[in-house]
Amino acid sequence: TTTPHYYPILSLVIQTMTPDLKAHAPTICHARRLSSTPSPEEQAVLRRSLSQPLPELLPKYFYDDVGSQLFERITTLPAYYQARTEIQILQRHAAALMSGARPRHLMELGSGAGHKIRLLLNSFEQGERCTMLDINELFLRESLQLLSADYPRYTFDGLVGDFVDDLDQVS
């Protein structure tokens, strides 16, 4: 059985699950085929969005390799308080959160470079599995490699996708 606990400010989902004791190297799955060429449906949405009196673009289109690196830098700026606040909350409460939830499976949505998940992994030795979801495959691969090296007792999986459209693919 799965009992999800949602902490939206942290962009994390913690699940308590039946253990899967099979350890393996990090795997990357694709929720759907992501392409640098938008599908006809996406092209129509983009055309409508950019043709409005005040043009707009969905943020997911900003997270190519350069955009993801830029966002990581933005999160370190004094004006960008959200990431700093989330990290402060985790630094203060990760141990209590993890001991209360006692998860075997952690998931981070929009994981980026994986900084916040480390605070949870450091706070709880009983976990077994960690799944990271991010729209940028390069960032996801790099995060999974580093996390696998630093936390060898965990099984890490990655899902390349959009946490708005592909959340149903996370298991």
Image: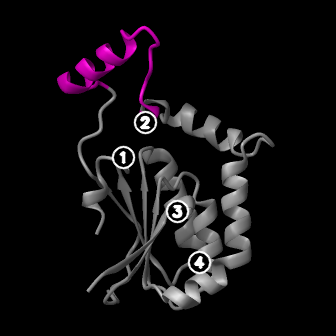
Quadrant position of residue 77: top right
First in sequence, mark 2 or 1: give its number: 2
Q: Amino acid at mark 1?
A: Asp
Residue 42 in percent (x, y) is at 26, 26
Mark 4 = which residue? 121
* Magenta part of the chain: 37-60
Image point 63% across, 35% down: which residue? 70
- Comparing labels 1 and 3, the label whose residue is closer to the camera: 1
Extreme residue in the left direction = 40
- Contact (Cβ within 8 Å) of mark 4 with mark 2: no
Name the residue at the right extreme.
78
Looking at the image, which is closer to me, 28 or 31? 31
Q: Nearer the viewer, mark 4 or mark 2?
A: 2
Q: CA distance from mark 2 to mark 1?
A: 7 Å
Q: Which mark is residue 60?
A: 2
**In the image, which disc is placed on residue 145?**
3
Task: Decide: is 29 above or below 156.
Answer: above
Of the numbered discs 4 and 2, the one sitting upstream in the chain is 2
Answer few, some or many: residues within 10 Å of disc 4's Cα (few below 14, many 20 plus, some between 14 and 19). many
Cβ–Cβ under 8 Å for marks 2 and 1: yes
Q: Which residue does the numbered mark 1 point to in the structure image?
A: 162
Question: Horizontal and vertical percent for residue 168?
Answer: 25, 59
Indicate the amino acid at tag 4: Leu
Q: Is residue 39 visible?
A: no
- Mark closest to the chain's N terminus, 2 or 3: 2
Q: Position of residue 57 (x, y in %)?
A: 43, 24
Badge 3 element: helix
Q: Residue at x 31, y 89 (%)?
A: 18
Task: Give the left or right position of residue 42, taking residue 59 as reference.
Answer: left
**Quadrant, the N terminus:** bottom left
**Gap between marks 4 and 1, in whole Å?**
23 Å
